[in-house]
Image (spheres, rainbow, N blue to C red):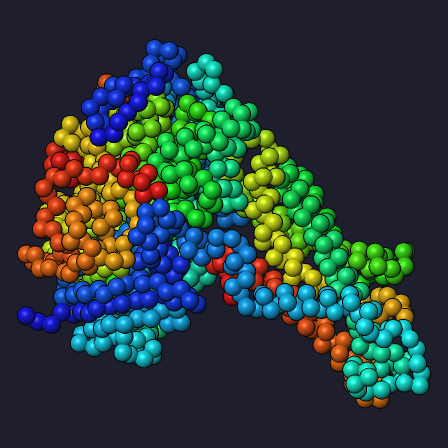
């Protein structure tokens, strides 16, 4: 079906009209050409589009701030594991801005060191999930029908396994260490990445420039690596960024259920778990509030960054 | 109007504007450059829960004459895009044979190139124009890096773009500019056959004219064999030496462009010609479209007999039962019809009145 | 002279996106009389579709600033609140959109979608609506209207879907139909039928037609009057025959020359494309691409009356064969 003019409600095409330039050699504003809708929307450099989204910039700033504060905490904060029973269960004060927990440990520094771990787990698990997912998805998309089918059945199997069971299995086999926790979370999340990668790969493969690459005699490997993959990764990376939020929440849930890191190691989820009893029975609200807020703040920031990335990659889907 | 440089192996000498002395140059082998015999292409589909086959191409016999331009006309469902893919080697037929006879010395893998319809997806968004043009040269180890850079600039100039476009990304170019880059990229490997699959259909009228004009000039200068696939009869008429009309995966008529389009033999070809709008209100308003409002049947559920019989004014019992074969109906003309021959309405009258344009 | 059915006065539409402002329509004046068919012709970016959407009140309010007057039956549509405009839409002015596959809801049967329009605007009950649906489908030439009403959009062919859209537009018996490229997505054989259908129906009912198109051939068969738009302005308008056979503006002339043509012998005539070039913001927008450019073109030309129409150009007729700027050189210079 061929159309010579784009349909009107796509406002980006309208701007092609009366925009500037009396000087000859300018780009997409030359008259009498097809309104290339993406040309009006996508900035010259992809980052420019990203930076224009205020939320994305704010989210990035928050994340960078959190990372900076958490990593430098040992320099300025109280030692997070210093037990001081005399100062147990103190509400927030100048000395202890987040209060203390039942063992008298300063909750602010616990939150910071816990943040280091939580954020590390979140990003590492996302990276691992993306690595596994992209490899599986790309292989499925690029491979023969049977390869595709086989890999997708593998994905189905993993979807079918109850997540909790998988985690418990991994923990009981190899204990609750940083690598195993990251692995557990990755094992729960890679399938979505794989499906997305495969779907995007398949659709990119049908694009005209890929057909042109094949016609120009490029090897299948070159076609896949130079032409298909780079254009596949865009949407995948956007989804992956949002996966960080999911990973953090998963880690918090695991800690909350007692399947995460063992004490005295602090994570935000672990702190939440420890705070249940005291909050409900003794009304020590600060012990749960701050870790919870930090989780929420991080997830929000990550979501904003992900939305900004999505808008920068594909302006038409900006929310 | 355009200055033409005739390369030594050019397939035609450029005469007065537009008119070409066509035909292969003596250094080229005789015979068609591409020959299709009884080509079928079937796609598996699901219809009403059962597996069926979409018979996109149905026994196509086609010769692509060397150094000339063939126009392939058809509407949706005609299989013209599938045929274009087969011609260029992107798709292998389910049955039948495709014989490609390139000139000696051409690189077999890249001797056939295609320009696609959608300017939005014809270029890799991640590559600059320079990369897109240099990559084929690099992959096939043509020239030194310096020579490749120069060649890229030459190619841009060949398609009428300024050298400063080299550093741009596709999203910084307009639709017409992208199509030109796509053409330049196809020419980078010195192809023998260039297939344009609705290459101008998505462009504005004025841009379409520019790109068409470019294609004609390139064809004349470089001696390419061109296949222009389009639903737009006026585009095809302007550019082609020969025309083949497709309907539901079959070639229903073929012959020299002027003759076929002035006095079509097959009723579908006649209907196409009749339907082309003429930019003259007196003519357009006087036209009445006759016949049933029927449309092409579902390609996945073909009817017996002639594929066109549901919509044909000349239909009779033979047509409903026997599928006609492509047979000669005059000098160098073929038609697949049980009742071929000039349709009374197209011999005279305003429908084929080119001079009114 | 009776008042025209539709009168657009100095329509200006700006698209605002943060700090960027794009002037899609820059002062358009247009009239459509009762029972008249007017075509607005232009390429992408000319502002023709935006103009049509403005008449229908379908421009997104958040992003668009619309100024001017759009008078329909004496009433200024731009001054109406959204609720009132919604009542007019479908009843007084209706749209036949471009892509039937995108314009019909795939999960509802065609008859139901049509019935919804009927009940909304003709205020009929269920049974009456169903009868009207069958009548409408028959009017637009769909075979077996009752059966077709029970089908889903994807079960119909492209031409049939477009006919359904036409039926939906006619359902409210509007005084004006705005057709936005209604045949672009159709095959050429089907296109001819659909054009004929729409023209017949509107003439028969005395409905006015505002036809937006880029296809001059289609326009030739439809329009009583034609307006040519470029860069948000009308460059020329007049009776179809005058404009298409004796164009006054160089752009119109160039467009007509851009169409591939053949001579009597069937041999192709050389194509003379309009050279590529930017749109000028000062003076005549078309000047950078115009073969008849003169120093006077640095001032924005006004619309001058010419015969039964008007032209926005300092020249009189672009027929004096000045040597047009050679295409290749102009392209390279303009960097396109």
The residue sitting at 28% across, 57% down in the picture is: C281
Q: Quadrant of the C terminus of chain C?
A: top left
Q: Quadrant of the rendered structure where residue B166 is?
A: top left
Give the number of marks.
0
Q: Quadrant of the rendered structure where residue B335 is?
A: top left
Q: Position of residue C167 (x, y in %)?
A: 28, 62
Instruction: Tell me if residue A108 comes above or below residue C300 in the rendering.
Output: below
Q: Where is residue C32 in the image (x, y as percent from the top left)?
A: 16, 65
Instruction: Tell me if residue A109 comes above or below residue C214 in the rendering.
Output: below
Q: In this view, does B273 lie to the left or right of B144?
A: left
Instruction: Tell me if residue C252 comes above or below residue A216 in the rendering.
Output: below
Q: Position of residue C250 (x, y in %)?
A: 17, 48
Q: Farthest bottom residue?
A: A282
Q: Nearer the viewer, residue B341 or A197?
A: A197
Q: In this view, does A258 lie to the left or right of B79?
A: right
The residue sitting at 44% across, 67% down in the picture is: C18
Instruction: Tell me if residue C163 comes above or below residue C121 in the rendering.
Output: above
The residue sitting at 57% across, 63% down in the picture is: A307
Q: Which of C265 and C231 is in front in this view?
A: C231
Residue C309 at least partly seen: yes
Q: In which quarter of the image is the N terminus of chain C?
A: bottom left
Q: In this view, does B190 lie to the left or right of B251?
A: right
Residue C146 at least partly seen: no
Q: Quadrant of the rendered structure where residue B201 is?
A: top left
The residue sitting at 13% across, 39% down in the picture is: C322
Q: Where is residue A188 in the image (x, y as percent from the top left)?
A: 75, 58
């Amino acid at each position: 079906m061929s159309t010579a003019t784009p349909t009107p409600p796509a406002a980006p095409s309208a701007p092609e009209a009366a925009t500037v330039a009396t000087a000859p050699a300018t780009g997409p504003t030359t008259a009498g050409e097809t309104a290339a809708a993406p040309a009006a929307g996508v900035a010259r450099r992809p980052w420019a589009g990203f930076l224009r989204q205020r939320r994305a910039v704010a989210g990035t700033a928050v994340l960078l701030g959190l990372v900076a504060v958490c990593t430098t905490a040992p320099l300025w904060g109280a030692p997070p594991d210093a037990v001081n029973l005399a100062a147990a269960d103190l509400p927030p004060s100048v000395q202890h801005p987040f209060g203390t927990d039942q063992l008298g440990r300063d909750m602010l520094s616990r939150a910071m060191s816990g943040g280091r771990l939580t954020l590390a787990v979140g990003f590492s698990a996302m990276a691992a999930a993306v690595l596994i997912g992209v490899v599986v998805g790309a292989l499925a998309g690029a491979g023969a029908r049977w390869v595709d089918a086989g890999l997708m059945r593998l994905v189905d199997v993993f979807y079918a396994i109850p997540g909790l069971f998988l985690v418990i299995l991994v923990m009981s086999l190899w204990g609750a260490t940083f690598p195993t926790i990251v692995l557990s979370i990755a094992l729960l999340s890679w399938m979505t990445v794989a499906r997305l990668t495969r779907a995007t790969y398949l659709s990119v493969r049908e694009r005209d420039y890929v057909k042109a690459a094949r016609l120009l005699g490029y090897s299948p490997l070159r076609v896949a690596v130079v032409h298909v993959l780079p254009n596949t990764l865009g949407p995948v990376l956007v989804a992956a960024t949002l996966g960080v939020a999911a990973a953090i929440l998963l880690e918090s849930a695991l800690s909350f259920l007692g399947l995460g890191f063992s004490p005295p190691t602090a994570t935000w989820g672990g702190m939440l778990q420890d705070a249940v009893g005291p909050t409900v029975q003794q009304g020590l609200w600060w012990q749960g509030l701050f870790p919870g807020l930090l989780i929420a703040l991080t997830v929000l920031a990550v979501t904003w960054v992900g939305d900004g990335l999505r808008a920068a990659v594909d302006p038409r889907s900006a929310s | 109007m355009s200055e033409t440089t005739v390369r030594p192996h050019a397939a035609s000498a450029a005469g007065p504007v537009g008119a070409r002395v066509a035909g292969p140059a003596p250094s080229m082998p005789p015979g068609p450059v591409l020959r299709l015999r009884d080509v079928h292409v079937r796609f598996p589909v699901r219809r009403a829960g059962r597996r069926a086959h979409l018979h996109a191409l149905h026994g196509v016999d086609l010769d692509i004459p060397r150094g000339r331009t063939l126009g392939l006309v058809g509407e949706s469902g005609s299989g013209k895009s599938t045929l274009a893919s087969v011609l260029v080697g992107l798709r292998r037929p389910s049955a039948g044979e495709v014989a490609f006879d390139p000139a000696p010395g051409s690189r077999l893998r890249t001797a056939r190139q295609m320009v696609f319809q959608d300017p939005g997806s014809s270029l890799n968004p991640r590559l600059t124009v320079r990369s897109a043009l240099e990559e084929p040269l690099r992959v096939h180890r043509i020239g030194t890096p310096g020579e490749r850079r120069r060649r890229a600039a030459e190619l841009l100039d060949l398609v009428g773009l300024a050298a400063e476009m080299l550093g741009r990304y596709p999203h910084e170019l307009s639709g017409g500019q992208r199509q030109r880059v796509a053409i330049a990229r196809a020419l980078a490997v010195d192809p023998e056959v260039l297939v344009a699959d609705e290459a101008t259909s998505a462009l504005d009228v004025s841009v379409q004219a520019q790109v068409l004009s470019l294609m004609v000039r390139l064809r004349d200068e470089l001696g390419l064999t061109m296949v222009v696939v389009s639903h737009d009869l006026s585009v095809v008429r302007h550019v082609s030496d020969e025309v083949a009309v497709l309907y539901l995966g079959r070639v229903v008529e073929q012959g020299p462009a002027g003759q076929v389009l002035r006095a079509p033999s097959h009723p579908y070809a006649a209907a196409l010609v009749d339907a082309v709008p003429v930019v003259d209100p007196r003519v357009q308003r006087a036209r009445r479209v006759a016949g049933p409002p029927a449309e092409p049947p579902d390609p996945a559920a073909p009817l017996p007999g002639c594929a066109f019989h549901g919509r044909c004014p000349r239909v009779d019992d033979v047509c409903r039962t026997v599928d006609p074969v492509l047979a000669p109906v005059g000098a160098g003309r073929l038609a697949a019809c049980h009742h071929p021959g000039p349709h009374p309405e197209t011999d005279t009258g305003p429908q084929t009145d080119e001079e009114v344009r | 002279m009776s008042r025209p059915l539709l009168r657009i006065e100095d329509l200006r539409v700006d698209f605002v996106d943060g700090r960027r402002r794009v002037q899609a329509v820059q002062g358009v004046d247009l009239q459509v009389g009762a029972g008249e068919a007017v075509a607005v012709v232009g390429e992408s970016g000319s502002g023709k579709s935006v103009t049509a959407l403005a008449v229908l009140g379908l421009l997104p309010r958040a992003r668009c600033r619309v100024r001017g007057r759009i008078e329909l039956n004496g009433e200024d549509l731009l001054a109406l609140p959204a609720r009132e405009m919604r009542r007019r839409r479908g009843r007084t002015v209706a749209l036949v959109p471009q892509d039937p596959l995108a314009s019909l809801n795939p999960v509802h049967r065609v008859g139901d979608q049509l019935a919804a329009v009927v009940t909304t605007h003709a205020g009929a009950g269920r049974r009456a609506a169903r009868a009207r649906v069958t009548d409408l489908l028959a009017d637009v030439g769909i075979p077996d209207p009752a059966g077709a009403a029970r089908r889903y959009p994807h079960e119909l062919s492209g031409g049939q879907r477009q006919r359904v859209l036409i039926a939906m537009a006619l359902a409210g018996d509007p005084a004006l139909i705005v057709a936005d490229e209604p045949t672009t997505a159709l095959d050429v054989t089907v296109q001819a039928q659909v054009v004929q259908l729409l023209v017949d129906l509107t003439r028969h009912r005395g409905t006015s037609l505002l036809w937006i198109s880029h296809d001059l051939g289609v326009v030739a068969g439809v329009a009583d009057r034609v307006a040519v738009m470029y860069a948000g302005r009308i460059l020329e308008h007049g009776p179809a025959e005058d404009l298409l056979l004796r164009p006054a503006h160089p752009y119109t002339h160039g467009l007509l020359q851009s169409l591939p043509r053949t001579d009597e012998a069937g041999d192709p005539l050389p194509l003379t494309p309009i050279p590529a070039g930017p749109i000028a913001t000062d003076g005549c927008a078309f000047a950078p691409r115009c073969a008849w450019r003169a120093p006077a073109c640095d001032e924005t030309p006004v619309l001058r009356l010419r015969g039964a129409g008007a032209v926005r150009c300092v020249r009189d007729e672009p027929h004096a064969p000045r040597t047009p700027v050679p295409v290749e050189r102009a392209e390279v210079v303009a960097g396109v």
